[in-house]
Image: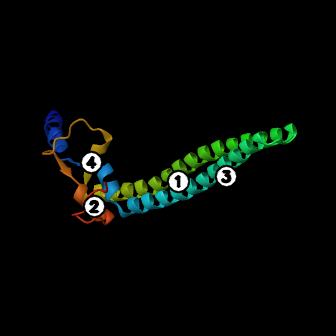
Amino acid sequence: MKKFLIVIMLLAPMSLLAQKFGYMNSAELIQLMPEFSKAQKKLQDLEKTYTNDFNAMRTELEKKGTEFEKLQQDSVPENILKRRYEELLQMEQRLQQASQELQQSLAQAEQQEMIAIQTKLRDALDAVGRDGGFVCIFDLAGGVPYISKSLCEDVTAKLRTKLGIPANAVPAK
């Protein structure tokens, strides 16, 4: 029995060395994914639409402000000036609210797009890990301080293949 325990204790460190560890860079892979480029284009188009709407509202506010200044120079009754001033204040508040909603909508749209991209990467990572028999795959983008490249395998190429990214593709700038 003692011999059996000694053999197990001697073989245990060897079995740990036989484990496969890998590493990859998720930030680089995400930028190479076609879905990322599509998401960026979609978000840029959405931002452009929101910006155009916002600019139209701001132009209308500026126009009303100019009209209000002209009214002040003319002999317009005080009650009309007061009502127009309150309209301007309300328009300005709506403009500020629209700005906040615009930023929130863009952030939410970006988050939704990234969830789909990260899910696809995670599925590919799971498949490469299973198929390659890896115990652990580290992500260099996660701030891992040190990875021995001689003891770990770079699985980035396998992930590129699994994600359908050409080997010669470079990240978008």
- Within-10-Å neighbours for mark 2: few <14, some 14–19, many 20+: some
Q: Which numbered disc covers residue 42? A: none
Would you name the residue on which mark 3 appears? 60
- The image shows residue 40 at horizontal and vertical percentages of 43, 58
Q: Which residue is mark 1?
A: 109
Residue type beneath disc 1: Ala
Q: Nearer the viewer, mark 4 or mark 3?
A: 3
First-in-chain label (3 vs 2)? 3
Secondary-structure class at tag 3: helix
For the residues labelled 3 and 2, the Cα–Cα distance comes to 50 Å
Give the mark, 4 or 1, whose residue is nearer the N terminus. 1
Q: In this orientation, does residue 125 appear? A: no
Residue of label 2: 160
Crowding at dot 3, Cα within 10 Å, few <14 / some 14-19 / many 20+, comes out as: few
Q: Quadrant of the N terminus?
A: top left
Quarter of the image where one finds residue 166: bottom left
Q: Amino acid at mark 3?
A: Glu
